[in-house]
Amino acid sequence: MLVNADFHIHSCFSMASSKDMLIRNIAPKASQKGLKLVGTGDAFHSGWLDIIEESTTYSGDGIYSTDDVDFVLTTEVEGKHRIHHVIIIPNLEIARELSEKLPSKNKSIDGRPKTNYGGAELLELVKEYDCLIGPAHAFTPWTGMYKSYNSIYDCYEKKPDFVELGLSADTFMADKVSELKDFPFLTNSDAHSPWPHRLGREFNQIEMEDISFSSIKHAIKHKEIKANYGLVPNLGKYHMTACTKCFKLVDPLIAKENKMKCSCGGTIKKGVDFRISEIADLNEPQHPKFRPKYVHLMPLAELISAVYDKGVTTKTVQRKWQLLIDNFGTEIDVLVNTSLESINNIDSKVSLAIESFRNNTIEVIPGGGGKYGNISFKKEPVSREITLDNF
């Protein structure tokens, strides 16, 4: 069966997360999004594990279910050099035992525990318990693995199970790094709130025998991810090199000359695009045979917001979003599967916007420095590739 899965989210216990990040809120929003399988996030936090146990029914083999949505235990850990790692865990008992073993001073406070363990130590620890592990948002400038290392093997010493791309990168960028040719790529939301413009904004479509931890492990190990869905990467808020204060895009070479200081006094942060250009050893992406398609999209509410120039949470946008969901079932169906003619009968402007995504005619004003990019619509296809000439 084909399953839409988002493995990386956070709970109400994580810093900067919504207090609404509870199972009772996540499950119905995941259904509206079109997700069947969701990572719990924060599975080393004892309070969150208690809520998971109380709010779900154990379906066996690592799956906890409620309201037709299945959850698998996952967590993000901040390790040495502030690098973030995603871990997929077989069951509650193992999550509790690993949490006890992980040296961390804040794991009872923050859903994302901090530890002095490096990638190699974390990999060795979790592999004792049959967990899956890989770098979270591998290229992002604050907490991505490649911000500190030029090779994934310098971080983990051995081969981890997957690479999470993050919102500011996609397959076309990552496959310019030849050492990643043997890794499956995951595209996850890193959602801090349950609303569908956050939850599942990136997701994976996976071939699974059934919904179980064993099937998840098999699918990742045997590279049976059939599609990655995610943002156009230059919509990501760390895609381009930019100032974190005024958000001005800056030529990365000039930024280096100015010691990463902006004329406004702010700090310039190296963008994912430039970081990949530094470590890439291929001029063009070379996709291995198993690499699935990467489909660019953006959350439906954000698309409606851009079309009507209204805030995502305004009544206008939410009413139009709900009308489309009522007619076509899930957000993913609206964005990916529903005919443009059918959408046009409900909202012609949104239909044109979705058509632009499907036809690759979206124009993006790139994001950087912590600010998301913006979109506009053109009649002719536009290139997804960003080069130094675009700075």
Image (cartoon, rainbow, N blue to C red):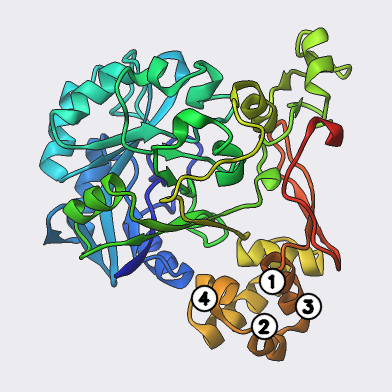
Q: Where is mark 1, residue-wise? A: 354
Seen at 62% across and 28% down, the residue is 276
Residue density around tag 3, few if under 14, some if 14–19, many if 20 or more, within 10 Å: some
What secondary structure is found at the residue carrying circle 3?
Answer: helix
Considering only order in the chain, which callout, 2 or 4, is on the residue closer to the N terminus? 4
Q: Quadrant of the C terminus?
A: top right
Name the N-terminal-most of marks 3 and 2.
Answer: 2
Residue on which disc 4 sits: 333
Number of other residues with Cα within 10 Å of mark 2, as a class: few under 14, some 14 to 19, many 20 or more? many
Residue 69 is marked as none
Report the side of 310 relative to 209 (left or right): right
Residue 369 in the figure: left or right of residue 60: right
Distance of label 3 from label 2 (alpha carbons): 11 Å
- Residue 310 showing in the rendered view: no
**Three-letter amino acid code at the position of disc 2:** Leu
Residue carrying label 2 = 340
Q: Which residue is mark 3?
A: 349
Residue 46 on image: x %, y %:
22, 37
